[in-house]
Image (cartoon, coloured by chain):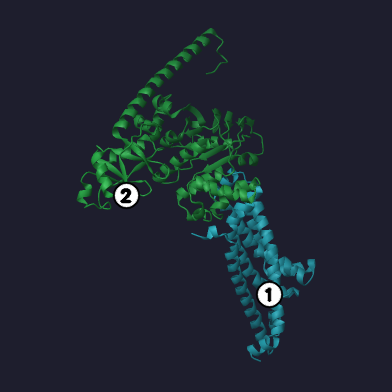
């Protein structure tokens, strides 16, 4: 069976897997973004806390993803929970780091001006600091998403959702008729998803980065 | 601070002190100062003298470690700083506009925070843009990065004035713009203050700027010690000590010219014609004027050209080719120094004075300038003598009192 025939036969299954893959990554990204920005906001003003947050999130990233999922199985069981936890944790680092860098990079005279005209701490954060730090934060989110696309494939190891299942099935039956097709389909699917997400982020950037920072 | 007419409020600083942990000397040491309502007071001094720190303690961007601050009689040393700052306008160097907001959004920030209605904010933004000399229709929706430095600074001042605060703090606001723009902005500020009567505290290290803008100048030395706090005239003619005279620098007589405005001297009338007048009438005026030249005004009555006798003949009756273009005019708010400059450059020794929209109002010439400068300097000299006399008398009183033994608690 050629690759194209394989796709023709299994496209329904593949689309379902792709959809689940995308949805898992998307939902974990939402959680990671909220958590990551929050950690950034809480820690950026203290040298010590900011470095600690960056260091611990990058510490998480050094754990091999396969090991992380494997270690989580006895604690939270199989399926969705270990997938979500792993993806969220891995997604944190770029977001936390870019939030801290972005927030620290806001021109101090602007913060001074905001204070001087009587903006409260919260107003300063929401109306001045976060909007100005948003471009680097968004870059962090993009990097995270790309990374999670690949890591999510490994979730199939813990019977999680997504295109990883197709890849794992193919790898398990290497030598059989469809093995290569399966691996190929899963991999190409993930690449396409990643590109689609990236395109979406370009659009999100256009819509959410204030025009005043974009114009030069 | 509840002035309903929103003119200035007085500011009193009492033993104001700032001590940073880990440094032996306080950064600001025991400043006492009374600033009257509606007054422009300039803090001037070398860098690092604590003038900026003192200013920032007034709106408590820097929390004082000792002393009291009263604005309009109300003690604001312990009130919520966010509330305090909404009643005190604040303008800083290079404007500090938020780049992600439009000009209008920047100006609207404070009114929004204190809960004005949408229409009121919109009207106020238009009014303020107009006030600082920017066309509301054109600049309303622009972003700060699309503005020149001078325009940004104008918006910065508009933002500081947005909620009509009685007090305006300005921290070297014109420090980062080019000299020509700075000059312009200074003139604008003077004009604004004529309309608004705010209490303005203004920090600069430029003594000429201080002379030009201040009702009173506080010359500060290290740790914000006040070397002299007086009118610009008094500081120029009667500096308290070597530090102050060093700061005043050379050319005090020339600087004195910065203190008087064109509107304070005699503006003479001059024969004029407009471009719309028929040629014959222009000829007649030239002949009957009794002067060598007449001033040609354009359609909007702005000075356009100096026409000399014979110019028109040589140009065969063409107004477009005849005469020499007016290349410099001064407004009634310009300083005598500006006027002198313009007169010196003009080869006939006079300069046209214009009103707000550039329309002709009169002429100032060399003779007028010389006379007024002589009068000014003479008056200053007399005043200084009197002040010195007073000072000596108080000193004599003090020594007397000390000798009597009851002067211990009485400090000058």
Query: Which color has been applied to chain A in this rendered view?
Result: cyan
Which residue is depicted at the point 70% across and 76% down?
A: A19
Query: Which color has been applied to chain B in this rendered view?
Result: green
- Please, what secondary structure does the residue beneath circle 1 have? helix
- Please, what secondary structure does the residue beneath circle 2 have? loop
Dot in front, 2 or 1 = 2
- Vertical order, A48 against A157 (above or below): above
Near mark 2 (Cα within 10 A), the count class, few <14, some 14-19 or many ≥20, is some
B33 and B380: which is toward the camera: B380
Residue at the outermost top position: B404
The image quadrant of residue B179 is: top left
Which residue is depicted at the point 25% across and 53% down?
A: B318
Q: Mark 1 points at which residue?
A: A153
Q: Name the residue under label 2.
A: B275
Residue at the outermost bottom position: A1
- Chain ID at mark 1: A
């Amino acid at each position: 069976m050629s690759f194209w025939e394989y796709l023709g036969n299994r496209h329904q299954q593949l689309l379902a897997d792709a959809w689940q893959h995308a949805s898992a990554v998307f939902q974990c990204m939402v959680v990671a973004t909220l958590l990551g920005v929050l950690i950034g906001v809480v820690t950026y003003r203290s040298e010590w806390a900011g470095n600690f947050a960056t260091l611990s999130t990058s510490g998480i990233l050094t754990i091999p993803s396969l090991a992380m999922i494997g270690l989580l199985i006895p604690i939270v069981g199989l399926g969705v929970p270990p997938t979500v936890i792993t993806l969220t944790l891995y997604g944190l680092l770029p977001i936390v780091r870019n939030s801290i860098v972005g927030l620290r990079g806001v021109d101090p005279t602007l913060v001074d001006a905001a204070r001087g005209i009587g903006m409260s701490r919260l107003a300063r954060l929401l109306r001045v600091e976060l909007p100005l730090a948003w471009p680097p934060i968004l870059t962090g989110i993009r990097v995270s998403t790309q990374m999670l696309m690949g890591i999510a494939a490994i979730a199939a190891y813990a019977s999680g959702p997504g295109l990883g299942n197709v890849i794992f099935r193919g790898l398990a039956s290497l030598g059989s008729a469809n093995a290569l097709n399966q691996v190929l389909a899963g991999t190409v699917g993930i690449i396409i998803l990643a590109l689609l997400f990236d395109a979406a982020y370009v659009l999100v950037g256009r819509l959410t980065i204030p025009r005043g920072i974009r114009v030069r | 601070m509840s002035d309903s007419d929103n003119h200035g409020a007085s500011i009193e600083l009492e033993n104001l002190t700032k001590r940073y942990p880990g440094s032996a000397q306080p950064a600001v040491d025991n400043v006492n100062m009374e600033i009257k309502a509606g007054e422009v007071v300039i803090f001037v001094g070398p860098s690092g003298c604590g003038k900026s720190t003192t200013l920032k303690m007034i709106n408590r961007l820097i929390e004082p470690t000792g002393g009291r601050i009263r604005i309009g009689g109300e003690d604001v040393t312990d009130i919520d700083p966010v509330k305090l700052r909404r009643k005190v306008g604040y303008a800083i160097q290079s404007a500090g506009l938020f780049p992600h907001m439009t000009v209008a959004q920047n100006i609207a920030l404070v009114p929004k925070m204190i809960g004005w209605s949408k229409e009121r904010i919109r009207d106020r933004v238009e009014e303020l843009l107009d006030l600082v000399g920017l066309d509301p229709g054109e600049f309303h929706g622009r972003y700060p990065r699309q503005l020149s430095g001078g325009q940004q600074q104008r918006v910065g001042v508009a933002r500081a004035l947005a909620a009509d605060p009685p007090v305006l703090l300005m921290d070297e606001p014109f420090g980062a713009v080019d000299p020509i723009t700075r000059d312009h902005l200074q003139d604008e500020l003077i004009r604004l203050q004529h309309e608004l009567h705010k209490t303005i505290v203004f920090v600069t290290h430029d003594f000429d700027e201080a002379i030009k803008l201040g009702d009173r100048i506080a010359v500060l030395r290290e740790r914000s010690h006040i070397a002299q706090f007086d009118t610009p005239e008094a500081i120029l003619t009667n500096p308290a000590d070597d530090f102050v005279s060093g700061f005043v620098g050379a050319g005090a007589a020339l600087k004195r010219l910065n203190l008087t405005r064109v509107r304070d001297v005699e503006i003479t009338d001059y024969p004029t014609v407009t471009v719309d007048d028929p040629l014959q009438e222009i000829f007649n005026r030239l002949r009957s004027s009794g002067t060598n030249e007449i001033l040609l005004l354009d359609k909007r009555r702005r000075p356009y050209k100096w026409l000399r006798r014979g110019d028109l003949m040589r140009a065969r009756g063409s107004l477009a080719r005849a005469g020499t273009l007016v290349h410099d005019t001064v407004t009634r708010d310009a300083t005598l120094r500006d006027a002198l400059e313009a007169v010196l450059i003009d080869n006939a020794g006079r300069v046209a004075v214009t009103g707000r929209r550039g329309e002709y109002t009169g002429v100032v010439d060399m003779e007028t300038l010389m006379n007024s400068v002589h009068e000014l300097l003479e008056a200053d000299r007399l005043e200084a003598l009197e002040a010195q006399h007073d000072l000596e008398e108080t000193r004599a009183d003090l020594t007397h009192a000390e000798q009597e033994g009851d002067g211990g608690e009485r400090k000058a």
